[in-house]
Image (cartoon, coloured by chain):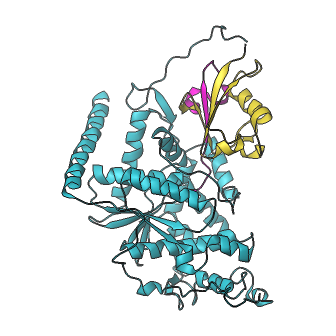
């Protein structure tokens, strides 16, 4: 059984992912950590313009990732191992203000 | 791998400031892990310190907050409103928005600003390119094509904000420029060799000697923290890209800066510090400030850039001011009668406060409100003092 997690998007990221703010997904067993998740999202979920999401196997600089509503840098970043019911949030900082 | 696999639990991390809360952000400026409550506190109070040290405001000053509905200006409006009450700045705050006339973009973001006005109970004024210049951005793009939109829009916006402020009777505009923006500008000015701008771009307040001055309270505030603050506080902001400039935020300097930040997040502060430390010994490069002969707005040339661009549009020569003059003046488009959008742009020097300035949202002032404000101020001050005590005791 794969893990079920919630993905949420903000700051304009939602446009790249079917214009949904939030969605639940079941992960294949091969997806273990955030690095795998980003690759999986790029291949399976991304609607358009992958260069706006991924750069060198991570998110593009300027995209903030939250793991259960806390900065991913606290939780180990790319190496964080996903657990069932995790909520992962992607927010772009790159739009005007 | 199954979810039953035993995992080695790492020890729980605690907030580096209060030593008790669960950290939610790693501060890019200091590397500290900070909990939500402490994050709000340091975020707001650092902006307060920047304002106090920069001697930004006078008491009872009327101040217009440039509001686009985007993340920076939304957080700016929220935090300025909060600090004004908490620290008794006694500022008369107004939101000022520019309607460039971009269907499907600005009309939506203006709806956000209108909601913000109600949420924070701040008056809102909207001025449009159409009423000021006779042209909306949609019409300009139709005329001038897709290439130089941002030139038109940027030149016209600068003036529009100043004109709106005069109508409101405000002599001071706040913008949401953050530390990342300023570091980016420092880099660009170094690359361009633009010495006068390199000096000015790190000042917290500019235009002290002109009719309207501008300040940047977020001068030392990281973009990441602004976005996190807006996210945790669930502030209502607009984050769609402008339809005419889908790639505007992918400039080389910005990408370079974000890469630097990833390697060492203090780089942003360091670049601002470099910009601040730069001092130009000669005054050769500072253009004398003059006033445009046509519209009375500040200009380093006889005719300001906005007037040149508008002349081009009105005469069917939309590349005037963009290409070399000779090329731009060749083959003017014939303008049929009734087609001209030309209006007389009001002379900036003659503008005065409009007594019945048309507002998008007005705040009713009453005795009761005053009492509520005093009450609120007390509560806000108490919460800050509590927080300070809590942090001192723990040290």
Give left or right: position of B369 versus B132.
Answer: left
Asked whether residue A74 is drawn in magenta, I would say yes
> What x and y, as percent, mark residue B371?
19, 51
Q: Residue at x 56, y 74 (%)?
A: B129
Up the image or down, B243 lies above or below B381; here it is below
The quarter of the displayed image where residue B394 is located: top left
The magenta segment: A72-96
Residue B220 visible in the snapshot: no
Q: Quadrant of the N terminus of chain B?
A: top right
> What x and y, as percent, mark residue B317?
73, 85
Q: Residue at x 24, y 51 (%)?
A: B373
Asked whether residue B380 is drawn in magenta, I would say no
Q: How many marks?
A: 0
Q: Looking at the image, which residue sits at the far front?
A: B338
Give left or right: position of B77 versus B187.
Answer: left
The quarter of the displayed image where residue B310 is located: bottom right
Up the image or down, B208 lies above or below B337; here it is above
Q: Quadrant of the C terminus of chain B?
A: top left
Check the rendered structure and report the hue given to chain A: yellow
Chain with cyan colouring: B
Q: Residue at x 50, y 63 (%)?
A: B202
Residue B129 visible in the snapshot: yes
Q: Residue at x 56, y 76 (%)?
A: B130
> What x and y, as percent, mark residue B225?
50, 44
């Amino acid at each position: 059984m794969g893990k079920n997690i919630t993905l949420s998007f903000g700051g304009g990221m939602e446009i790249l992912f079917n214009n949904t703010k939030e969605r639940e997904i079941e992960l294949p067993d091969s997806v273990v950590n955030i690095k795998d998740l980003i690759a999986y999202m790029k291949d399976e979920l991304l609607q358009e313009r992958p260069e706006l999401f991924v750069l060198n196997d991570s998110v593009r600089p300027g995209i903030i990732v939250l793991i259960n509503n806390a900065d991913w840098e606290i939780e180990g970043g790319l190496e964080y191992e996903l657990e069932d019911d995790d909520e992962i949030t992607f927010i772009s900082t790159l739009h005007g203000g | 791998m199954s979810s039953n696999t035993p995992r080695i639990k790492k020890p729980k991390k605690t907030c580096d400031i209060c030593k008790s809360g669960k950290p939610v952000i790693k501060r890019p400026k200091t590397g500290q892990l900070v909990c939500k409550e402490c994050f709000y506190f340091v975020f707001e109070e650092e902006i307060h310190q920047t304002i106090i040290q920069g001697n930004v405001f006078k008491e009872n000053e009327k101040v217009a907050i440039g509001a686009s509905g985007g993340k920076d200006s939304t957080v700016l409006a929220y935090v300025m409103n909060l600090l004004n009450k908490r620290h008794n700045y006694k500022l008369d705050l107004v939101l000022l928005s520019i309607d460039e006339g971009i269907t499907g973009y600005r009309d939506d973001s203006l709806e956000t600003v209108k909601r913000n006005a109600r949420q924070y109970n701040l008056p809102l004024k909207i001025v449009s390119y159409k009423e000021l210049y006779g042209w909306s951005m949609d019409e300009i793009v139709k005329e001038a094509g897709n290439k130089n939109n941002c030139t038109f829009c940027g030149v016209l916006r600068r003036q529009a904000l100043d004109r709106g402020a005069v109508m409101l009777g405000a002599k001071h505009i706040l913008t949401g420029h953050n530390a990342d923006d300023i570091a980016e500008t420092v880099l660009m000015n170094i690359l361009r060799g633009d010495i006068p701008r390199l000096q000015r771009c790190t000042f917290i307040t500019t235009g002290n000697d002109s009719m309207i001055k501008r300040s940047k309270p977020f001068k030392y505030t990281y973009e990441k923290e602004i976005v996190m603050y807006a996210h945790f506080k669930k502030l209502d902001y607009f984050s769609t890209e402008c339809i005419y400039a889908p790639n505007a935020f992918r400039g080389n300097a910005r990408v370079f800066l974000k890469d630097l930040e990833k390697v060492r997040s203090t780089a942003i502060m360091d670049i601002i510090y470099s910009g601040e430390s730069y001092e130009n010994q000669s005054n050769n490069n500072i253009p004398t400030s003059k006033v445009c002969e046509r519209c009375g707005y500040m200009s380093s040339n006889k005719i300001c850039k906005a007037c040149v661009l508008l002349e081009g549009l009105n005469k069917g020569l939309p590349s005037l001011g963009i290409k070399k003059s000779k090329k731009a003046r060749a083959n003017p488009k014939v303008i049929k009668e009734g087609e001209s959008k030309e209006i007389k742009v009001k002379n900036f020097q003659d503008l005065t406060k409009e007594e019945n300035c048309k507002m998008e949202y007005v705040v009713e002032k009453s005795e009761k409100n005053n009492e509520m404000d005093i009450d609120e101020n007390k509560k806000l001050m108490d919460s800050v003092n509590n927080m300070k005590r809590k942090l001192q005791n723990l040290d």
